[in-house]
């Protein structure tokens, strides 16, 4: 964290869930924000956030919630980020910094930069952290400790705004990396978005086989199916938005996966035991490399 970072007078969090709420708590832990205002549609969730000390005040009206903020964190689903930023344009104080936490950056950054031109500065952000819980009640200050947050500046990003957002995430406990927005989307399509799509597709395939055989497949499943498809329990609306917003990169990743499945099918069809063993061994080695990487982070 930069030595001269003094925090923010007022932060507005639009979408006070796990990520937005945890960020507010993390900054409070460090004494780096004087006032936090929450904005959202659910009054019940906002009241929970205030009762937990996440918020000082809240509003269900976007204009009322952001007017006094020197930083706005947009923590809505990906499909709502651009429209939300466009809607707040006329209500921001001059020079306000706006950032987001979405897992798609290319199209979101371009849309938000255009919406804020001449008014404020947008800094794209993606904290790679989370749990299976959601809502303000799931927030906790330590969520980002040691986790990676990717910031995606462009040639339109004000250096002082980037420095402030970087310092904010470092203060929250995160490690920060800078990346081109479109490269971010290609990488995340492979390591995050594709696994979700495959998990959804596998459950769909199992359902199709159940219907074809009129049999209860799930009743015979062990831990493998449950563990492999854990992420298929994620919010369908959120993942619909991610799939559409990152369409080009996701299609590239899906094609790569389809190619791997076609290779696997061919080996099974041909009864190629050595080929199967080689494919499985290569995949196992890559999985072990992933485990070592995770262990080194902890």
Image (spheres, rainbow, N blue to C red):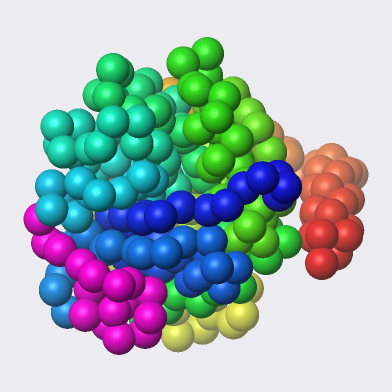
**Residue at screen point 82% across, 60% down:** 297
**Residue at screen point 50% across, 32% down:** 161
Q: Where is residue 262 in the image (x, y as percent from the top left)?
A: 61, 34
Span highlighted in magenta in the image: 45-61
Compared to residue 191, the image places residue 249 above or below, namely above
Q: Quadrant of the C terminus?
A: bottom right
Q: Is residue 114 visible?
A: no
Nearest the eye: 230 or 45: 45
Q: What count of labels does the image hold?
A: 0
Would residue 148 be found to the left or right of residue 93 on screen? right
Nearest the eye: 173 or 264: 173
Q: Where is residue 254 in the image (x, y as percent from the top left)?
A: 51, 34
Q: Where is residue 90 in the image (x, y as percent from the top left)?
A: 14, 32
**Residue at screen point 50% across, 70% down:** 28
**Residue at screen point 44% across, 25% down:** 106
Would residue 128 be found to the left or right of residue 79 on screen? right
**Residue 260 appears in which quarter of the rendering?**
top right
Confirm whether the magenta stretch covers residue 48: yes
Compared to residue 272, the image places residue 27 above or below, namely below
- Residue extending furthest toward the top: 155
Nearest the eye: 166 or 229: 166
Confirm whether the magenta stretch covers residue 55: yes
Q: Where is residue 142 in the image (x, y as percent from the top left)?
A: 61, 73
- Residue extending furthest toward the left: 61
Q: Is residue 118 visible?
A: yes
Would residue 252 be found to the left or right of residue 216 on screen? right
Nearest the eye: 208 or 242: 242
């Amino acid at each position: 964290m930069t030595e001269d970072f003094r925090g923010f007078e007022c932060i507005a969090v639009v979408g006070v869930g796990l990520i937005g709420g945890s960020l507010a708590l993390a900054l409070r832990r460090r004494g780096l924000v004087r006032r936090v205002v929450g904005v959202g549609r659910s009054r019940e969730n906002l009241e929970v956030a205030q009762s937990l000390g996440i918020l000082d005040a809240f509003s269900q009206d976007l204009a009322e919630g952001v007017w006094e903020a020197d930083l706005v964190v947009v923590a809505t689903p990906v499909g709502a980020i651009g429209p939300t930023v466009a809607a707040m344009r006329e209500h921001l104080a001059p020079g306000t910094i706006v950032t987001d936490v979405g897992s798609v950056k290319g199209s979101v950054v371009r849309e938000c930069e255009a919406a804020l031109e001449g008014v404020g500065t947008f800094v794209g952000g993606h904290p790679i952290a989370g749990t299976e819980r959601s809502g303000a009640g799931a927030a906790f200050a330590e969520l980002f400790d040691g986790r990676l947050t990717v910031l995606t500046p462009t040639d339109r990003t004000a250096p002082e705004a980037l420095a402030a957002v970087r310092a904010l995430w470092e203060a929250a406990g995160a490690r920060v990396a800078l990346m081109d927005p479109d490269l971010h989307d290609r990488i995340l399509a492979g390591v995050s978005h594709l696994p979700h799509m495959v998990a959804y597709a596998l459950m769909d395939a199992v359902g199709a086989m159940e219907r074809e055989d009129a049999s209860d497949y799930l009743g015979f499943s062990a831990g493998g199916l449950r563990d492999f498809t854990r992420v298929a329990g994620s919010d369908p609306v959120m993942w619909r938005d991610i799939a559409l917003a990152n369409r080009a990169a996701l299609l590239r990743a899906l094609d790569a996966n389809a190619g791997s499945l076609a290779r696997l099918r061919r080996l099974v069809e041909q009864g190629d035991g050595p080929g199967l063993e080689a494919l499985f061994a290569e995949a196992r080695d890559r999985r072990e490399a992933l485990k070592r990487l995770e262990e080194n982070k902890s």
